[in-house]
Amino acid sequence: MALSRDGTALRLKDDDHVAVCLHDVPAGGEIAFAGGGCVVARTAIPAGHKIALRLIAAGELIRKYGQTIGRAAVAIAPGEHVHVHNVEGTRGRGDLAPGTDAAADKAALR
Amino acid sequence: MIFAGYRRRNGTVGVRNHVLVMPSVMCANHVVDRIGRRVPEVITIAHPTGCSQVGADFEQTKRTLAGFACNPNVGAVLVVGLGCETNESKALASEIAARGQRVEVIGIQESDGTSNTIARGIEIARALLRETQPLERTQADVSELILGTECGGSDAFSGITANPAVGYAADRLVEAGGTVILAELPELVGAEHLLAERALPSVAKKLYELIERVEARARAMHVDMRYGNPTQGNIAGGLTTIEEKSLGAAYKGGTTALREVLEYAERPREKGLVVMDTPGQDIEQLTGMTAGGAQLTVFTTGRGTPTGSPIAPVIKIATNTSMFERMRENMDVNAGTIVDGTKTIEDVGGEIFDWIVAAANGRRPVAEQFEFRDFAINRIGPSF
């Protein structure tokens, strides 16, 4: 677990893709960790929400707590707010079950 | 470690000494309510179940009502039935009696109407109070405690502050020989492997089966769980997916071995950490754990929720200082101090453990002081 230099964000495991903002972070706010790693918030990020610590490719599994918390729905740049607008769940996805419209759409795109 | 509790005839120990008046079917809710208005010392509950139910859904309703009535915090029970219900009041009372609980039963049809039933119910309720109230607290051991753990109205701080602190307290109780229930199965989806690693193969297998059952329900409904769980408030609080919520929720179970996986409202046979299959919906979860024998529950919340149990102390742990200060009247412990940097997880976990022992000894958390008495049975089938 690592706290950013100014105590604004918490990275729960060293190889996590995201840090949790402990306080509201304004657009342009700098999150820097001892031992390297510094990102600039691209938009304001509310307390409790996540900031990307590195580039996450579209489709890549996203790690927090050293565990998978979902999949990037689009490419996510360092410093971006990471939330429901750019992350999909990988579990409890009954909408992707065979026979659904979403599953048919996904199959057609392959 | 010892506390002073109410020793029951069947050997269990209560942390409260309530008389419970309960309907076997929703058609008796008003009679139960009228008895409670005239005898306010008793606890009354109401529910919308008990008729036109079949199969596993009916079994679960019966198990919940009987389990709730047999929680060690209850010294005696009055069951009020209608007379024609699927959930026959006399059968329910027999089940309660078979588990060693003091129980009486009356029916509205058999008593020729509601007025007679209310009058008879008032007499019986007063008699049960006279019978049970002289019982005094005697020495008991914390190894006799079953602790429910719950998070409701979670935010992103739940998994960083309050849940790990509850996990620390859970470990202390397990080390002292007690039992801890981790529940809300949908909120373990994505974290189940971490628990399975700490379980015997047969226990791990059952856990995976129950998790699969949750996801099968989402498939049967063709829905993304994220439309209902995480909730809108969870998402506003920074939680993005069910996996993320689950990874934070699982911290409540601490770090000890997982000993057993239980059905909803089933009583643990093992000591130590157990998992119960309840929904994430707060009230159904709390009811299930309490019906499984939990004498008290620790409940973490980030958004702030006032939930309480009719018969068991529910200790509220705030995950962040901002909500703790705004909803001070509804919170018992502030775990927000962990991110504020003024306390450690161990400090707050120790406070929570002390609160558990104090509540077992009679200290009343705020939800109990407010007499917030939430009760709801989880349905797993339709009414016919």
Image: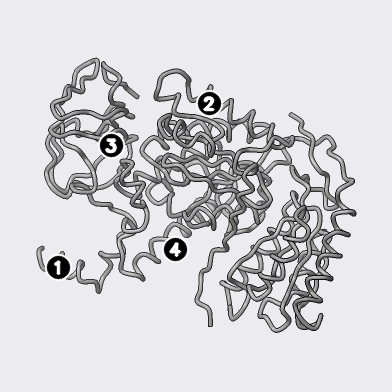
* Vertical arrangement, residue B207 with respect to residue B304, above or below: below
Sequence-wise first label, 2 or 4: 4
Subunit bearing disc 2 = B
Residue A84 visible in rendering: yes
Q: Establish whether labels 1 and 2 are both on one chain.
A: no
- Residue B53: % across, % down: 58, 78
| Horizontal side, residue B24 vs residue B99: left or right | left
Q: Quadrant of residue B56?
A: bottom right
Q: Which mark is residue A105?
A: 1
Few, some or many residues within 10 Å of mark 4 (<14, 14–19, 20+): some
- Residue B334: % across, % down: 50, 29
Rounded to the nearest angstrom, the CA distance separating label 3 from label 1 is 31 Å
Most extreme residue toward the left is: A109
Sequence-wise first label, 3 or 1: 3
Subunit bearing disc 4 = B
| Horizontal side, residue B247 vs residue B273: left or right | left
Q: For the residue marked with disc 2, what is the amino acid? A: Val
Q: Establish whether labels 3 and 1 are both on one chain.
A: yes
Q: For the residue marked with disc 3, what is the amino acid? A: His
Helix, strand or loop at mark 2: helix
Pointer 4 residue: B213
Pointer 3 residue: A49
Helix, strand or loop at mark 1: helix
Rounded to the nearest angstrom, the CA distance separating label 3 from label 2 is 23 Å
* Residue name at image x 25 percent, y 74 percent: A99
Pointer 2 residue: B348
